[in-house]
Amino acid sequence: MDMIREALATLPDAVFADLLESPTSYRLILDVPGVDRSGLDLEATEHHLELRATRTKQVPEGFEYHTDARSMTLSATIPMPTDADPEAASATLENGVLTIDVPRHEESGRSIPIEG
């Protein structure tokens, strides 16, 4: 969990992110206002989530930008705890809020009998 918190802390101040935990999963909630599904790319590896969000600007006819101070792209690598299963993650985008659910691995160990 600390690795995730540290990764979220490195996001720009303008990005609001929450981390929730249950006995069966982790949930990351990221505010990505102005980003639609076509501007999102979320990839899972064994130990990380890779997020890239791009917001496009629409300039009304007759107007032009004079300042462009805000970044239009967010890129983040979010490490996952060892019990997380990023490859089974799912995500939804609703009203500019990206919710990523990452289940925990089910315990798959087995008891080993000891002879003697």
Image: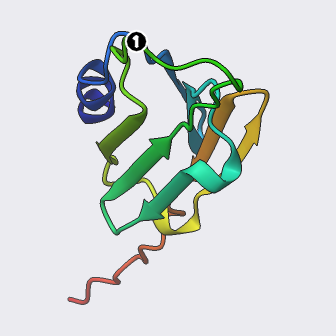
- Disc 1 marks a residue whose amino acid type is His
Q: Quick check: can you spot residue 22?
A: yes
Image quadrant where residue 30 sits: top right
Residue 88 image position (x, y, % from top left): 58, 66
Image point 33% across, 26% down: which residue?
8
Image quadrant where residue 47 sits: bottom left
Image quadrant where residue 34 sits: top right
Dot 1 falls on a residue whose secondary structure is loop
Q: In the rendered view of the protein, which quadrant contains the C terminus?
A: bottom left
Image point 26% across, 31% down: which residue?
7
Packing grade of label 1 (10 A; few <14, some 14-19, many >=20) is few
Image point 31% across, 24% down: which residue?
11
Residue 73 image position (x, y, % from top left): 39, 37
Residue 61 image position (x, y, % from top left): 71, 26
- Extreme residue toward the right, this view: 94
- Give the colour scheme shown: rainbow
Residue 79 horizontal side relative to residue 50, left or right: left
Q: Nearer the viewer, residue 60 or 114?
A: 60
- Above or below for 28 versus 60: below
Residue 40 horizontal side relative to residue 3, left or right: right
- Extreme residue toward the front, this view: 62
Residue 47 horizontal side relative to residue 86, left or right: left
Q: In the rendered view of the protein, which quadrant contains the N terminus?
A: top left
Q: Quick check: can you spot residue 24?
A: no
Report how many numbered discs are placed on residues in the image: 1
Question: Which residue position is annotated with label 1?
Answer: 66
- Extreme residue toward the bottom, this view: 115
Image point 37% across, 18% down: which residue?
68
Residue 41 horizontal side relative to residue 33, left or right: left
Q: Nearer the viewer, residue 43 or 60?
A: 60
Residue 21 image position (x, y, % from top left): 54, 30
